[in-house]
Amino acid sequence: MSLNGKVAIITGASSGIGAETCKHFAKAGAHVVAVGRNLENLKLTAETCAKTNSSVKCLLVQADITKDTQKIVNETLAEFGKIDVLVNNAGIMANGSILEADLQQLDSVLDTNLRSVFQLTKLVLPHLIKTKGNVVNVSSVAGMRSFPNILSYCISKAALDQFTKCVALEMAPHNVRVNSVNPAMIVSDIYKRIGVNDEDYAKILERSATTHAMGRVGEVHEVAPAIVFLASDSASFITGALFPIDGGKSSMCPR
């Protein structure tokens, strides 16, 4: 799959799926706009991209996607003059059932996982119409199935899936495709960001292996190639798709 000369904005690029996706886009020949809050980690992402393909550029944009969407677009256009792909990857998680979560938590999760995606996509779409580009949203199996004790997160990802399908229909006449990937448990730092320690995280991974049909959890390198595929011309007749990368989890009953 070649993305030679394409320009891809990738949010949440300082770690996990986002950082790995930057590497795979660089490998495919795309110039990368790596967006994140942690500048030191973004620099590591840029170094990885350079080692992967020294012929592409990696623009670092230190930004909070809940506040700086216009900055992301402006800096991308100033450097490259166009946008071909938007990967909405940045997201946060929160624990809590309806009895434990509050409106502050819900607002915070929706602000990052949905509202910022809406705003950045809206700003980027006029440029994608010009390039006949596309959007890939990073959702979750939690948008497709219900799970207890992560209510705010599930709501945000279910809404993101509906956003993907609605915008795909609206943009199809403009030859702009919109799809999502829906990973299950992927080894990353998302749980650590909500305060889960190493010991408890190891227990979560151990239990999660039993709820995936393949008997294990996933790795970031198993998600990034699917994002590149959906962004490439190889997927030119795919839009409005929710693409599970879940080791069979969405087909199983255990939660």
Image: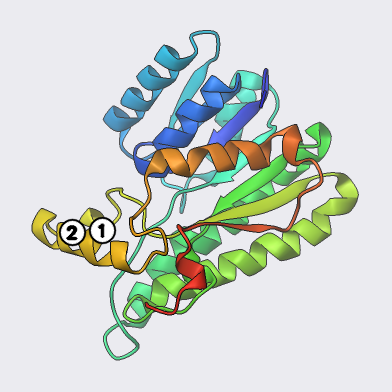
**Considering only vertical position in the picture, is 195 above or below 226?**
below
* Callout 2: SS: helix
Looking at the image, residue 74 sits to the left or right of residue 203; the answer is: right
Residue 49 placed where, x, y %?
44, 20
Q: Which tag, 2 or 1, sits closer to the chain's start?
A: 1
Badge number at residue 201: 2
Q: Residue at x 37, y 58 (%)?
A: 185
- Quarter-wise, where is residue 94 in the image? bottom left
Residue 191, disc? 1
Q: Residues within 10 Å of mark 1 (few under 14, many from 20)?
A: some
The residue under the point 21% across, 54% down is 192
Q: Is residue 114 above or below residue 188?
A: below
Q: Amino acid at mark 2?
A: Tyr
Residues at badges 2 and 1 in contact (C-beta under 8 Å)? yes
Q: Nearer the viewer, residue 101 or 25?
A: 25
Against 97, residue 245 (above or below) is above
Q: Is residue 44 left or right of residue 146?
A: left
Quarter of the picture containing the N terminus is top right
Residue at image coords 40%, 58%: 214
- Residue 229, horizontal then vertical, whole percent: 64, 38
Q: Nearer the viewer, residue 197 or 122?
A: 197
Residue furthest to the front in view is 214
The image shows residue 98, relative to residue 37, as above or below, that is below
- Residue 204 lies, in percent from the top left, at 22, 64
Circle 1 sits in a helix, a strand or a loop, which is it? loop
4 and 238: which one is in front?
238
Q: Total of numbered circles in the picture? A: 2
Quadrant for the C terminus in the image: bottom left
**Picture quadrant of residue 230:** top right
Q: Residue farthest to the top?
A: 55
Residue 167 vs residue 81, the one in the foreground: 167
Direction from residue 8 to residue 176 in the image, left or right: right
